[in-house]
Amino acid sequence: MEPMLSVRNLVKRFGGLVAVNHVSLDIYPDEVVGLVGDNAAGKSTLIKCISGVYHPEEGEIYFEGKQIFFSRPIDAREAGIETIYQDLALANNLNVSANIFMGREVKKNYLGGLVRVLDEDYMLDASKKVLDQLDIRFSSLVQKIENLSGGQRQAVAIARAMYWNARLMIMDEPTNNLGVVEQRKVLDLIHRLRDQGVPVILISHTLPDVFAVTDRIIVLHRGHKVTEKRTSETNSQEIVQYMVGALDDTRLESETT
């Protein structure tokens, strides 16, 4: 099976600081990959290079078999790479449907196109369909985002990405500041994305969540990828040792060659 995303020897510098240091990884269809590391490990910088926020100084990125370069985040989104950050980029004063179509509203014409107004019925119907696809239920799609729980807001952000044909989902701390029940709902959504063929890169400090949903775990430490393991073949204690720099597979490989 060919990887959907391939990163090869990626390097990103900020002045004299090397935030991402020759990192390579592959993401395959139908899998969830955990990207973990301590603060300043390079996780956020790496995904921002993938999603077009930052431009790496070295290395190559391939998506669906083609080498790509995204000059802007919108280019990555149009290619099918959706990144959901902790702030979710939702408008609290708008309803569920309006947030799913925010910036890409559908309009209908009157008077031969002289007048164009929002097609709210179409957007409501389309929103319901994508929410049903993900088995997400709301009492009303016209309630404002500010009235929803944290887990429900995450669900809206995920539904928006799915409606606009996400091929790869990157999620940055999606269960942060959520209660146990809400965390479970978000993790169920991640499972559902994988089951529908959308691979997920999950960035999280919450290792129980990582072990609950991922197939593989990649650990960064000070900009280096120090290990990559099948989730079923490791445990939290070992991953923590990699996160703090006590273990480093790349160092062991260099010492044995």
Image (tube, rainbow, N blue to C red):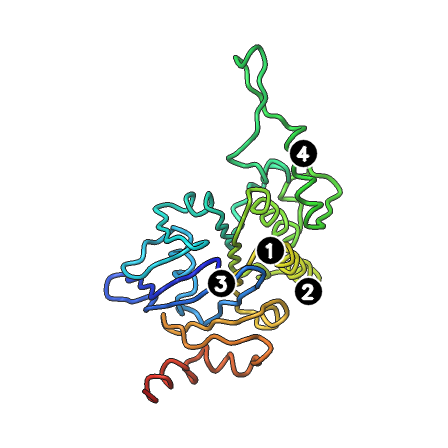
Choose mark 4 or mark 2, whichever is in front. Answer: 4
Q: Nearer the N terminus, badge 4 or badge 2?
A: 4
Helix, strand, or loop for circle 4?
helix
Residue at the top extreme of this rendering: 111
Q: Nearer the viewer, residue 191 or 83?
A: 191
Cα distance between the residues tagged 2 and 1: 26 Å
Q: Which residue is mark 4?
A: 124
Packing grade of label 1 (10 A; few <14, some 14-19, many >=20) is some
Q: Nearer the viewer, residue 254 or 91?
A: 254
Residue pictured at 70% horizontal, 49% vertical: 136
Q: Quadrant of residue 62?
A: bottom left
In the rendered image, residue 146, in percent from the top left (x then y), is placed at 62, 44
Give amino acid for label 1. Gly
Give amino acid for label 2. Val
Cα distance between the residues tagged 4 and 2: 30 Å
Helix, strand, or loop for circle 2?
helix
Q: Nearer the N terminus, badge 3 or badge 2?
A: 3
Choose mark 3 or mark 4, whichever is in front. Answer: 3
Q: Is residue 14 left or right of residue 230?
A: left
Q: Point out which mark residue 180 bears.
A: 2
Q: Which residue is mark 3?
A: 27
Residue 247 to residue 208: above or below = below
Cα distance between the residues tagged 3 and 4: 34 Å
Residue 123 to residue 203: above or below = above
Cα distance between the residues tagged 3 and 2: 28 Å
Question: In the picture, which quadrant includes the C terminus?
Answer: bottom left
Q: Point out which mark residue 118 bears.
A: none
In the rendered image, residue 166, in percent from the top left (x then y), is placed at 54, 48
Q: Which residue is mark 1?
A: 197
